[in-house]
Image (cartoon, helix red, strand yellow):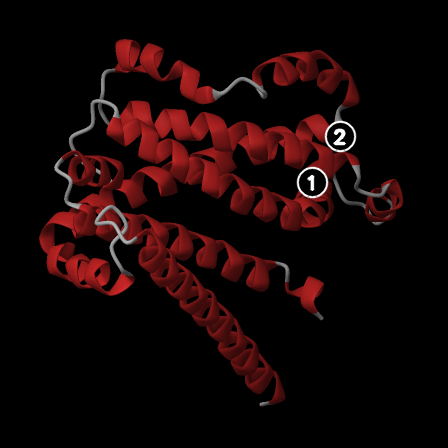
Amino acid sequence: MVVNKQQFNETSRRYQEYLLGIVLVVLGWQLLSILVAKPVIPGPMPAMVRFFEVLVPDLGRDWLISAYRVALSLVASLVIAVPSGLYLGRERRLDRVVAPAIYLLYPVPKVAFLPVLFILAGIGDATRIFLIFLIVFFHILVTTRDAARGVSSHSIYSVLSLGANRRQVYLHVIFPACLPKILTACRVSLGTAIAVLFLSETVAGSNGLGNFIFDASYRADYELMFAGIIGMSLLGLILYAVLDGLEKRWCSWQHL
């Protein structure tokens, strides 16, 4: 009963923090709208009213398309980058061979490959998903590799002494030790992923939130444009909240 009450209080506090953040953003938005006093920055209330007016079906459809692209890119990055990073972090010889290629490709802005990807794969979902995947993949790979390097050898030797095999060491020692940093890398890369999503959807795009916002701005419908921006903000908020919830659930030992 005590545990349930503590969980309820923690969840309630988290929702209050999110609500306070939203209130501060809305107040800052209203103040900026008053100071600028131009149609290009409408107040939050007209934009929110427009948001609900176009939510079904137009904005809602584009929101789901963008959410699908980001979520699939994130999952694909985790599935490939996490095992690769864990292995490279513990296999120093292989890491010395692969590291120069990682250091060469990691700093390159992946957006630079967008025209090439459009030529090779067309302008469909695959191109946009792969572009976001590249950005998130390298961030998670490097973070996971560095976290795996830092796992204490004493922890590994103690498990080996109990008869654990190599797979069990990775599954029960190295991966749990790296998991908090992996989730942190996901949260950090999420903002960049959504920014790249917006850019990719405005270039030769016909759907998604980026195309919705760009089309509204092209027609100088600024209330509609900000309705799309609200939708993109909610996308980031929901994905961030999901990652935050997963960390609370999977890394509960950090919050004891």
Q: Quick check: can you spot residue 130? A: yes
Q: Quadrant of residue 67?
A: top left
User: Residue type at mark 1?
Assistant: Tyr
Residue situated in front as seen by the camera: 224 or 252: 224
* Residue at the image point whose x is 75% and y is 24% from the top: 91
In this figure, which residue is indicated by the disc labeled 1? 170
x and y percent of residue 156 in the render? 82, 43
The residue positioned 31% from the left and 27% from the top of the image is: 200
Left or right: residue 119 compared with residue 100: left
Could you tell which of marks 2 and 1 lies nearer the N-terminus? 2
Q: Amino acid at mark 2?
A: Arg
Q: Which residue position holds label 2?
A: 90
- Characterize the local packing of mark 1: few (<14), some (14-19) or many (20 or more) Cα atoms within 10 angstroms: some
- Which one is in front in this view, the residue at disc 2 or the one at disc 1? 2
Report the side of 167 relative to 106 (left or right). right
Image quadrant holding the C terminus, namely bottom right
- Residue at 61% x, 43% y: name it: 182
Residue 141: % across, % down: 60, 30
